[in-house]
Amino acid sequence: MQQTQGETTREAGRERLVGIVLMCGAVLLFSVLDGTAKYLSRELPTPQIVWARYFANVLLVLAVLNPWTRPGVARARKPMLQVVRSCLLLGSTALNFLAVRYLQLAETITITFMTPLLVALLALPILGERIGPRRLAAIVVGFAGVLLVARPGVGGIHPAALFSVAGCVCYAFYGILTRMLATHDKAETTLVYSGLAGVVLLTPLLPLFWVQPPTALAWALMLSMGVYASVGHYLLILAHQRAPAAILSPFMYTQLVWMIGIGYFVFGDLPDRWTLAGGLVVAGSGLYLLSAERSRR
């Protein structure tokens, strides 16, 4: 009996380790996605890059899930929520890609780290979840960390940081709707709807922003973004199937390391001490929120 229990414990440990590795792989792919968008912004307008990201993503998702032979996968119980969620994801992506055009990758990801703080703040009025004084203090400290990065009014970073902040707000509402839809629709259904707004809304506008034919390298990079996004989200799903969110979530902050590395080796950027300090403050606040949530449960 003890041996069986020990084997079960070891198996659970291995599953959690695999989940952590998958989580780290997912955030690496998301980092490469942002780095690719920044590289393409040197020669292509942002709407064209955003459209390519969603077009390639939707093609891959439809090829894998194939809603024509599995019509049930595209049948949503809350279609309007799915549409709104998809539009929020499009807004978040477009604003983030605008931000990385002007900011260092380390700066954008540090600001993006405030998304869990926004979700915790919005959970009270939308989901009715209680926010205690300690969690509220952690949220305030996290926002102070973002201000430390942006330093508004004191010679801080480019005003494009506002795009990143607005993108975080969109992504926070997107996260709230994802949690709401989880009780109504399957994960595959939500995945099918995720990228549709980007294709449906941007494709008719292609003639307005398709200023020049992309080079062969640009085409390859544009298509690769859909692969990074699709595979990254798939790894995220696999990770959460193997380990609890409370264990996986801290590893999302490893994305700061990837972003600094890509920013340095590809673009020659190094974050200043304010960005690093702000990143540590925001990450610390997020980790405290995760710890508090785990203890509460």
Image (tube, rainbow, N blue to C red):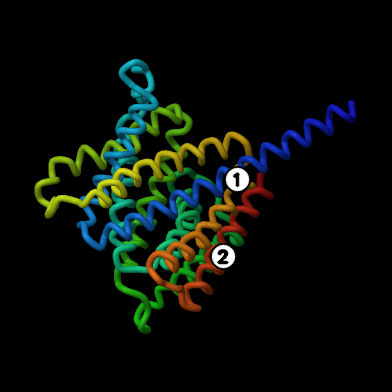
From what the image shows, is residue 168 above or below residue 240? below
Q: Quadrant of residue 176?
A: top left
Q: Is mark 1 on a helix, strand or loop?
A: helix
Residue 140 location in percent, x, y? 51, 66
Inspect the image, locate mark 2, and give the three-letter code of the amino acid beneath it.
Answer: Ala
The answer to whether mark 1 and mark 2 are in CB contact below 8 A is no
Using the image as rendered, state which of residue 198 and residue 27 is in the foreground: 27
Which mark, by number, is residue 137?
2
- Does residue 269 appear in the picture of this structure? yes
Which residue is depicted at the point 50% across and 59% down?
Answer: 258
- In the picture, the quarter occupied by the N terminus is top right
Which mark, by number, is residue 175?
none
- In the picture, the quarter occupied by the C terminus is top right
Residue 245 location in percent, x, y? 59, 44
Residue at the far bottom in the pictured view: 154
In the rendered picture of this protein, how many numbered marks are placed on residues? Answer: 2
Residue at the far right in the pictured view: 2
Crowdedness of circle 1 by 10 Å Cα count: few (<14), some, many (20+)?
some
Which residue is depicted at the point 27% across and 51% down?
Answer: 217
Crowdedness of circle 2 by 10 Å Cα count: few (<14), some, many (20+)?
some
What is the C-alpha distance between the residues marked 1 and 2? Answer: 31 Å
Q: In which quarter of the image is residue 155?
A: bottom left
- Relative to 78, 211 lies left or right: left
Inspect the image, locate mark 1, and give the three-letter code of the amino acid beneath it.
Answer: Val
Q: What element carries label 2?
A: helix
Residue topped by disc 1: 21
Using the image as rendered, state which of residue 56 and residue 9 is in the foreground: 56
Q: Nearer the viewer, mark 1 or mark 2?
A: 1
- Does residue 75 appear in the picture of this structure? no
Which residue is depicted at the point 45% across and 73% down?
Answer: 270
Q: Choose the circle earlier in sequence order: 1 or 2.
A: 1
